[in-house]
Amino acid sequence: MTKGNTFFKNTAILMAIFPIYNLIMGLINGVGTLSGFINIEDFASSTGFIHTAIIFFIIGAIVQIIVGIIGMKNADSPDKMNSCILLGVVVMLIYAASQILDYLGGGVHDTLDYIGMIAGFAIPAGFIIGAVQTKASD
């Protein structure tokens, strides 16, 4: 197992776990993008940007879990890294769209949200870097 392969496999695991944590914490704590689901009155009065951000967030989380699982399965296959790179870019774009819509919709952000945002971009970036390293080790 090469260094790139180990790094890729670890970030693939994070890709599968991080969105599950985000979904659960968003629903339990009522913070972040999913807070509108906790209080239906807030959801009904929120803007279309927030509704769209929630949809992007949920779709993005599901896609990210699937991409993480695909990455874990293909970690030993350098020939499949092109598709993993593409999937990593897709995850980053969906996440970026969700964050932009949440911001435009007036979403409230605190320090914990900013840490989550950084991790939301860092994990797919690490996934892409790991895929490139694994592909180069072929």
Image (cartoon, grey):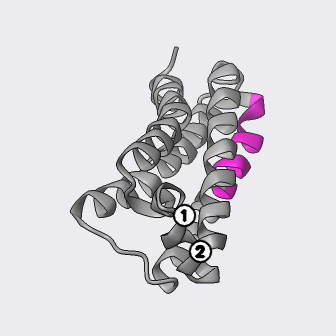
Q: Based on the picture, tell me whether residue 89 belongs to the magenta stretch.
A: yes
In this rendering, does residue 138 appear at all?
no
Nearest the viewer among 36 and 116 is 36
Q: Which residue is tagged 1? A: 40
Choose between 2 and 33: the one closer to the eye: 33
Q: Position of residue 32 (x, y in %)?
A: 41, 61
How many numbered tags mark residues here? Answer: 2
Residue lying farthest front?
A: 41
Q: Which mark is residue 44?
A: 2
From what the image shows, is residue 56 above or below residue 16?
Answer: below
**Quadrant assignment, res 134:** top right
Q: Name the amino acid type tagged 1.
A: Ile
Residue 104 is a magenta residue: no
Q: Position of residue 42 (x, y in %)?
A: 48, 72
Residue visible at 63% across and 36% down? 65
**Image height check: is 97 above or below 11?**
below
Q: Kindly indicate whether the residue at mark 1 contacts the one at mark 2 (C-beta within 8 angstroms).
A: yes
Which span of residues is magenta-colored? 79-90
- The residue lying toward the viewer, choosing from 85 and 123, is 123
- Is residue 70 toward the left or the right of residue 124 in the image? right
Seen in the picture, residue 132 relative to 46 is either above or below; the reply is: above
Given the current orientation, which residue lies at the most extreme left position? Answer: 111
Q: Which element is circle 1 on?
A: helix
Residue 59 has which mark?
none
User: Quadrant location of residue 120?
Assistant: bottom left
Q: Residues within 10 Å of mark 1 (few under 14, many from 20)?
A: few
The CA distance from mark 2 to mark 1 is 6 Å
Q: Position of residue 15 (x, y in %)?
A: 53, 37
Q: Which quarter of the picture shows residue 107?
A: bottom left
The secondary structure that most of the magenta stretch takes on is helix
49 is higher (above) or lower (below) than 56:
below
